[in-house]
Structures are given as structure tokens and as C-alpha cells.
Image (cartoon, grey):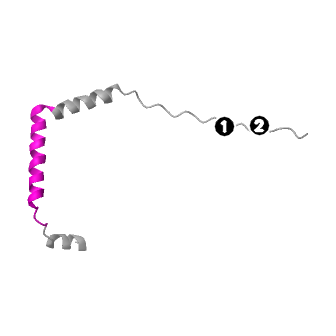
Amino acid sequence: MSVLQSLAGTIEPSPLSKYELERLDRIEANRRRMEELGVLETARSLMDAINASKPPPRAPRPHKPKVRVTHPAD
């Protein structure tokens, strides 16, 4: 058993504040409301449609070697 594991067993999580509990309740209520309205399923189907219509990624174009122009000495 590591030191962290032994210490983790002795540390108790602090209780949630009233604000945090109310926030969790609001998050859950909003999630249920969105589920009832079908928002999650609509978003999922839109994402599927977007992903289906995307063209496949292109292969990178090969780099052309640079051509150096030299001028003859006068």
C-alpha cells in the first residue's frame, strides 16, 4: 500500500455547501428537462448528420523541393 493510499483512507471529504447542493439539484433538473424535450437526442442526431456529411480527410500534399536560382558571375 502506498503512502497516498494510506492517507486517502484517513481523509474524509468535506460536506457540500448549501450552494453546491442547490447547484447539483439545478443541474439534474435541467438534465431531466432537456431529456423530456428531446434536446439530447436532437443534438446527438445533428452531430451524427454533421459527421456523416464530412468529407474524408485529405492526404497531405508532398512538398516540392525548392529551386535555387544562381546568377553566373560577370
| Camera-nearest residue between 58 and 34 | 34
Q: Quadrant of the C terminus?
A: top right
Tell me which residue sits at (13%, 37%) in the image.
Answer: 34
Q: Please, what is the three-letter code of the amino acid marked with disc 2?
A: Val
Asked if residue 9 shows in the view, the reply is yes
- Residue 26 in the image: above or below residue 44: below
Q: What is the secondary structure assignment of the residue under circle 2?
A: loop
At which x and y percent is residue 60?
A: 52, 34
Q: Quadrant of residue 65?
A: top right
Q: Is residue 61 left or right of residue 36?
A: right
For mark 2, does the 10 Å Cα neighbourhood hold few (<14), some (14 to 19), or many (20 or more) residues? few
Name the residue tied to disc 1: 65
- Residue 46 in the image: above or below residue 9: above
Dominant secondary-structure state across the stretch colored magenta: helix
| Camera-nearest residue between 5 and 11 | 11
Going by the picture, which residue comes out furthest to the front?
Answer: 19
Tell me which residue sits at (34%, 25%) in the image.
Answer: 53
- CA separation, marks 1 and 2? 13 Å
- Residue 9 in the image: above or below residue 47: below
Tell me which residue sits at (71%, 36%) in the image.
Answer: 67
Going by the picture, which residue comes out furthest to the top?
Answer: 53
Asked if residue 2 shows in the view, the reply is no
Q: Quadrant of residue 51?
A: top left
Is 25 in the magenta?
A: yes
Q: What is the secondary structure assignment of the residue under circle 1?
A: loop
Name the residue tied to disc 2: 69
Q: Quadrant of the N terminus?
A: bottom left
Tell me which residue sits at (13%, 41%) in the image.
Answer: 31
1 vs 2, front mark: 2
Q: Which residues are magenta?
A: 13-38
